[in-house]
Amino acid sequence: MCISDECDEGRRSFLATAAVAMVGLTAAKITAQTPKYPHDQKVVTRVLDDPSITHGPIVFQHAKKDTNVDGFLARPKAEGRYPIVIVIAGNVITEEYIPNTCAALAVAGYVGLAPNIFHVVPESAQTTEERRKASMGHSDSDALLDINAGIDYLRRQPFVQEDGG
């Protein structure tokens, strides 16, 4: 083990050289992955950008309780009545996959609704323990009532098939 200033300088020099080498290797890898021709580039298509659909957050009245439930709704823009699909998320509806799922359903000709069955949990609840405590009084039966409130909301909309699909 070396404890002199000379050894410390050697370690610093080694670490600086290693860092420069890593940066160089990373830059070479990125350059190798960059397409040389425009037609080599992969185009990423986001279903939420599809111009044939409309989507966004909604709020609907809970039928059995004196409260509102929020959700995410996506549907085709074209005039008509469409079948519905309820997207029941195991997480808050702001997770990216939930709006994407609803939008993909809309592209396929459905009305996709993700009711927020976690609406009783405030956005300020950051930890698992805070979220658990906030949702203690909200049972599975309450979540089913939230889902049914979403279905009732959709049945009143002019773009939904009368039998719901």
Image: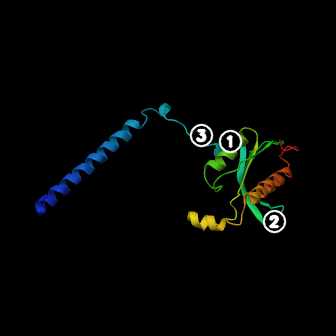
Q: Are marks 1 and 3 in contact (CB under 8 Å)?
A: no
Picture residue at 80% right of the left edge, 61% below the top: 62
Q: Amino acid at mark 2?
A: Lys
For residue 65, the mark is 2
* Residue 39 in view here: yes
For residue 151, the mark is none
Picture residue at 85% right of the left edge, 50% below the top: 155
Picture residue at 72% right of the left edge, 61% below the top: 139
Disc 1 versus disc 2: nearer the observer: 2
Q: Amino acid at mark 3?
A: Thr
Calculate the distance from the C-alpha at mark 1 to the C-alpha at mark 3.
Answer: 12 Å
In which quarter of the view is residue 93 placed?
A: bottom right
For residue 45, the mark is 3
* Residue 125 in view here: no
Secondary structure found at label 3:
loop
Badge 3 density bin: few <14, some 14–19, many ≥20, Cα 10 Å: few
Q: Amino acid at mark 1?
A: Ala
**Side of 38 relative to 18 (left or right):** right
Disc 3 versus disc 2: nearer the observer: 2
Question: Disc 1 or 3, which lies upstream in sequence?
Answer: 3
In which quarter of the view is residue 65 placed?
A: bottom right
Calculate the distance from the C-alpha at mark 3 to the C-alpha at mark 2.
Answer: 40 Å
Question: Disc 3 or 2, which lies upstream in sequence?
Answer: 3
Calculate the distance from the C-alpha at mark 1 to the C-alpha at mark 2.
Answer: 31 Å
Q: Residue furthest right?
A: 162
Q: Position of residue 142 (x, y in %)?
A: 76, 60
Question: Disc 1 or 2, which lies upstream in sequence?
Answer: 2
Near-viewer residue (99 or 165): 165
For residue 104, the mark is 1
Up-down relation of residue 10 to residue 21 (above or below):
below
